[in-house]
Amino acid sequence: MNQELINPKTWRLLLKIGIGFAVAFVAIWLIGFLLKTLKKNKTDATGQTANPDGTPGGWQIDIDKAYIDRMAKLGKTVHDEKDYSGYSSGRCELVNNIIQMRDEEIVALVELCKSQYGFDLRGDVTQMKGDGCWNPFGKEQHEAAAARLKNF
């Protein structure tokens, strides 16, 4: 009465099949993850990260679009923002991004402001004086961003 329910060779076969399914699942998941990552990190002609539609951009322009959109919904342009608490970090981030952006990103952002929101970002940044900016070098950063925008 000491018979085994399943013979040892069958157990080994079932174990191998289970391990095979686990390895296949992990491989398929890894391939999917890599394809998703590669699709998300599309690059433009210069090899820099681009927006999903291939236009220049990346994280900086996305942050700035969201910030400008938020200001437009309030009926304000960028330089009016100091009156609204909670938005100064967005203004500082916008100014820092302008300093760091590539030329084509700045062109795209200036065009976005003109076409979608009806204001000239170059004039708005020039009017910002760095008042109330959390950064002690806020005034210098605003001046650097304004100088950078004058070329566009």
Image: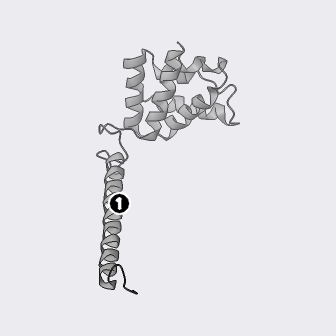
Q: Nearer the viewer, residue 101 or 13?
A: 13
Q: Secondary structure at mark 1?
A: helix
Point 67% across, 37% down: residue: 137
Q: Quadrant of residue 31?
A: bottom left
125 vs 58, left or right, is right
In this view, 67 is above or below 19: above
In this view, 47 is above or below 117: below
Q: Nearer the viewer, residue 31 or 49?
A: 31
* Residue corresponding to mark 1: 30
In which quadrant is the C terminus drawn?
Answer: top left
Point 30% across, 80% down: residue: 10
Does the image show residue 122? no
Residue 108 position within the rendered picture, expressed as x and y whole percent measured from the top left: 37, 30
Tell me the kind of residue under disc 1.
Answer: Leu
Residue 74 position within the rendered picture, expressed as x and y whole percent measured from the top left: 54, 15
Most distant residue in the front direction: 1
Point 36% across, 51% down: residue: 37
Residue 2 position within the rendered picture, expressed as x and y whole percent measured from the top left: 40, 87
Q: Quadrant of residue 13?
A: bottom left
Most distant residue in the bottom direction: 2
In this view, 43 is above or below 109: below
14 vs 151, left or right, is left
24 vs 103, left or right, is left
